[in-house]
Image: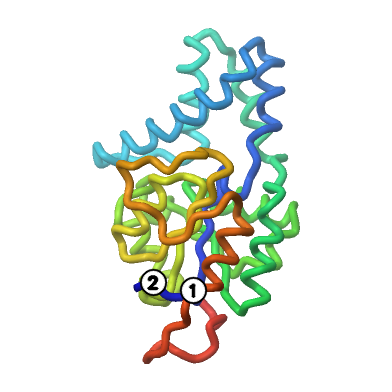
Amino acid sequence: MVHRPRTVAFDVVETLTSLEPLRGRFVEIGMDASTLERWFDRMLRDGMALTLAGDYEPFPVVAASALRVIGGGRLGDGDVQHVLDGLATLPAQPDAEQAMQVLADAGVAVVCLTNGVRESTEAFLGRTGLDRFVDQVISVTDVRMWKPPRAVYEHALARIGRPAADVALVAVHAFDCHGAHAAGLTTGWAGRLERHYAEIFTRADVIGDDLVEVARGLVDLPDRAGPSGGSPGGAG
């Protein structure tokens, strides 16, 4: 039986950040607006492929490589940089702040677990004001592998300082929830991106249309008494 988490780890890219402003940048370099989705899917695929092969490259490097592939090798360095520069200006998803507020009001601690670079994630949180809710940013660069291997989530648990039963992973990607579940975390999936939860992945413990519904669902889970009891919002 799953219980109310004491810490919630949010995925960042697409879960908290909106990639939509990049669409116009693809058009500005002569590509179709739908290239945004193709690029992001390619980037995730390549990052995971490197992990499966026992190698690693950080988010900015894989993002640039995927863009050049999607562009058929015809994009100049300036074109690639124009798109990637947009990453530093991305806004928060409209449901992110309210979801974090729900957790904060319930005394649940919040962290971020990202495939991105810690510094750029911290800059995003500061720019959007979400940093006031977030205790720490945990990046896959620490373990040199892209989600969803079990080791990524175990590293996050070590950084948080809580057992898996006390931590929930929230994402808009079912594969991320699947990986977190395999590591013993409670999981929450918001359906605003994928719309349909793929049957090949272990179903998330809490499912909602958006992050706010997921946050409320996690808070409404029964509390757990035990040796790690005390204030549910203890530091992590």
Q: Compared to 233, does 188 lie above or below?
A: above
Secondary structure under tag 1 reads: loop
- The spot of residue 84 in percent (x, y) is 62, 30
Check disc 2: other Cα within 10 Å, few if <14, some if 14-19, many if 20+.
Answer: some
* Residue at the spot 33% in from the left edge and 42% down from the top edge: 199
Q: Compared to 51, does 45 lie above or below?
A: above
Check disc 1: other Cα within 10 Å, few if <14, some if 14-19, many if 20+.
Answer: some
In the picture, the disc for residue 2 is 2
- The spot of residue 109 in percent (x, y) is 57, 73
Secondary structure under tag 2 reads: loop
* Residue at the spot 34% in from the left edge and 59% down from the top edge: 181
Q: Compared to 11, does 107 lie above or below?
A: below
Residue extending furthest toward the left? 53
* Observer able to see residue 78: no
Would you say 141 lies left or right of 109 here? left
* Residue at the spot 59% in from the left edge and 19% down from the top edge: 34
Of the numbered discs 1 and 2, the one sitting upstream in the chain is: 2
* Observer able to see residue 92: yes
Amino acid at dot 2: Val
Pointer 1 and pointer 2: residues touching (CB < 8 Å)?
yes
Amino acid at dot 1: Leu
* Residue at the spot 47% in from the left edge and 82% down from the top edge: 223
- The spot of residue 51 in percent (x, y) is 31, 41
User: Alpha-carbon distance for marks 1 and 2?
Assistant: 7 Å
In the picture, the disc for residue 221 is 1
- The spot of residue 85 in percent (x, y) is 67, 32
